Amino acid sequence: MDQSNGSDGERAAGPTPPGAVSRRRVLASVTTAVGAGAITGCASATPADRTDDAGGAVREEAWVETGVDTDDDGAADRIHVRVSRPEGATDGERPPVIAIASPYHGEQTHGDATAEMYYDRSVAPAPDGASGAGGGATTAATSEPATLGDPSGAGEPGPAHSPVGDPAALRRIERRYIPQGYAVARVSSLGTARSTGCYTAAGPPTVAALESVVDWFNGHATAYDAPEGGAEVAADWTNGRTGMIGGSALGELANGTATTGVDGLETIVPQSANVGQYGLFRSNGTPVSVVPDGSEGFTDIGTWIQASNARRDDCGHWTDRVEAGQDLATGDYNDFWHDRTFLADADAVDCSVLIAHAVDDPIVKPNNAADWYETLAARDVPLKLWLYEGGHRGPAGEAWERTLDRWWARWLKDEDTGVMDEDPVTVVRGGRSAAEGSMETYAEWPAPAAEPATVRFGPGGSTVGTVTTGEPDAAAESLVDDPSTPAADLVAADESPHRLRYETPPLAEPVHVSGRVVPSLSLSLAEPTVVSVALVEYYGRFSADIVTRGWADPLNRSAYRDYDTPLAYRQSLRESAPLPDDGRVGVEFPLQATDHVFEADSRIGLVVYASDNEFTLHPPGNRTVELSLADSSVELPVAGGESALAGAFADEQTDTATDAPAGTTAATGSATASPAGTADPPAERPAGTTDGLGSTVVSDGDATADGTTSGGGPGFEIGGALAALGGLGGLLRRDPDGED
């Protein structure tokens, strides 16, 4: 279906020449670091006290009484809802609701963590049952839990943020949708802003409370005009049909509410959103950082809950509950995480779902979207998936806006917009908008042509070994863990004892990888440590682009391919075990899902290393890992399968160091196009290498309801993001409303 027009240069959705625009844009690092809401259609902000922005909207507020009491004061918690709706609607024209639930409408957020709220990151994986008291992590030196609230055991503070509401963003959604006959509701989740109760980080009480809000829109719950006592307020201005939208934590709340199966919730549009907290704080049985961050102060869910409840009386017990459940030592899946995993309640989803996610999101990792899509598709939920590039932000461009407009009209007004007659999967390459690159559509995801292609390693990984579709080599190769070196430096190094690098010959033609890359590694360990694998695109000698990566605890020896569903795989991570006497273990796990076209003349690289400076624990002692090449392989989901991959290998290697593809950097300098005024990178780091999950994007945190970042996210203050832009600040411009 052609969703393009001439104004934004977007291509028709359909087959495009493979590799036409596959390189991630340096510009994305600029758009991600600046938290400006650019898309109309959704927002997260405190609305201005004006009525002229949306043609005379009526504004009112209410506190919806819920069925939970998170602060244990004997009174039901109440959720604050602020509504903007069309003025003068008749009974026959009562508007449906577009709701934005958020934990960021108030001043106190999980970004206000102090040093004592972080955890000691310099710990090693432990087998199940070997953690410290209360499920906390244990340090190798003391075997004592690195408990929350102990500054001496918390290391240096991790990155902080203070999300700031953007009144301009809500004005944009009101200007667009109130004239079209929708009401817009800003909902503050439990324990935040003007809602009562305690912050639970999208825990079961918060999800149940949001169910009450949808019930209120339908006349099945009670609201009042005050947080305590007050007169009843009826939502008689709406027909009760509700949609929810949001990015990051906002989209997480939409996902969670959908799993209640509440009547009246017709659709959700989660953007850059996780499917419960395990997918945010854990990966394949190991703890992971929410943001790319190399500091020794590690953020876990307990950090967020204590920080967000710091100004709330009678909420300290939530810190204790989380401390007992999160289990930083093993990273295992357990009942605590299961209660916070929306996959477990997917059978109850009774609304349509439009998932939007960036394949290079380093904060809410892409497996969240892949797990959700796979789970809902198996249940025949009305579903669309929109993938793009651009880090922790929402999609952009006219094609997306038109799709969103038609989506709302179809599901909230029952209009025949044709949106469900199109291919259900859209992949935008080259940025957030097809205007920045190209757009393709598919009948399903991974792309229907994708088939498993098994590749193996040839010796030489301390410098550069080979990736082949041929027979395995009998060698074994070793690396020494180095938590202090970023992955971008490891993958780019010509030689290093701290990683094993393997790559294909130069590609004679583009190769499309769509889905999850699954390493199956045979390792020998003297002591437990984390294992990491990166999929890399190499250009010439001086450019290395991390496409995606993944992390696992070798003490969790589940084989990913043995399980039919994402939830079944998570359940398999409930137990970890000590190393066997010979230290040899098999590890099979998925990297973060991706959809990427490797360009002709580039090389596909696979890099095996231990801990990841930015994302994993930092085990002490520089532990040694041995990889058996004979018993190790990687499954790549390649369009055309193994024959297409083998056919793309060029017969002879060509030197493209002085002829790098457009958009890359072939000279020494900042690996991520550092702006003027920033320090040069280490001399040994080649230009063109990348930070983040899999691109040049460096994200600044939680997305607002339109998928763009708020004035900070879980990890970076907006001031720091702007400082990182340095001399590029002049690229910003303001519109007549004073918006960036």
Image (cartoon, helix red, strand yellow):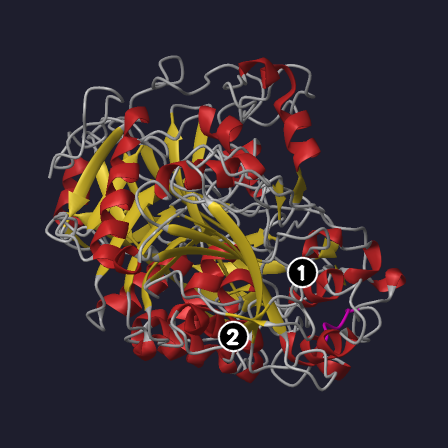
The image quadrant that residue 312 belongs to is bottom right
Q: CA distance from mark 2 to mark 1?
A: 24 Å
Q: Is residue 434 magenta?
A: no
Q: Characterize the local packing of mark 2: few (<14), some (14-19) or many (20 or more) Cα atoms within 10 angstroms.
A: many
Question: Quick check: 597 left or right of 188?
Answer: left
* Spot occupied by residue 11 in the image (x, y as percentages of width and height): 18, 28
Instruction: Measuring from the top left, give residue 324's x and y in whole percent.
Output: 70, 81
Q: Quadrant of the C terminus?
A: top right
Q: Earlier in the sequence, mark 2 or mark 1?
A: 1
- Asked if the magenta segment contains residue 139, the reply would be yes
Q: Residues within 10 Å of mark 1 (few under 14, many from 20)?
A: some
In the image, taking residue 211 as reference, residue 402 lies left or right, namely left
Q: Nearer the viewer, residue 473 or 20?
A: 20
Extent of the magenta region = 136-140
At horizontal 29% and vertical 21% (from top left) the residue drawn is 654
Residue that appears at 79% across and 76% down: 314
> Residue 237: in sight, yes or no?
yes
Q: Amino acid at mark 2?
A: Arg
Residue 341 horizontal/vertical position (percent):
47, 73
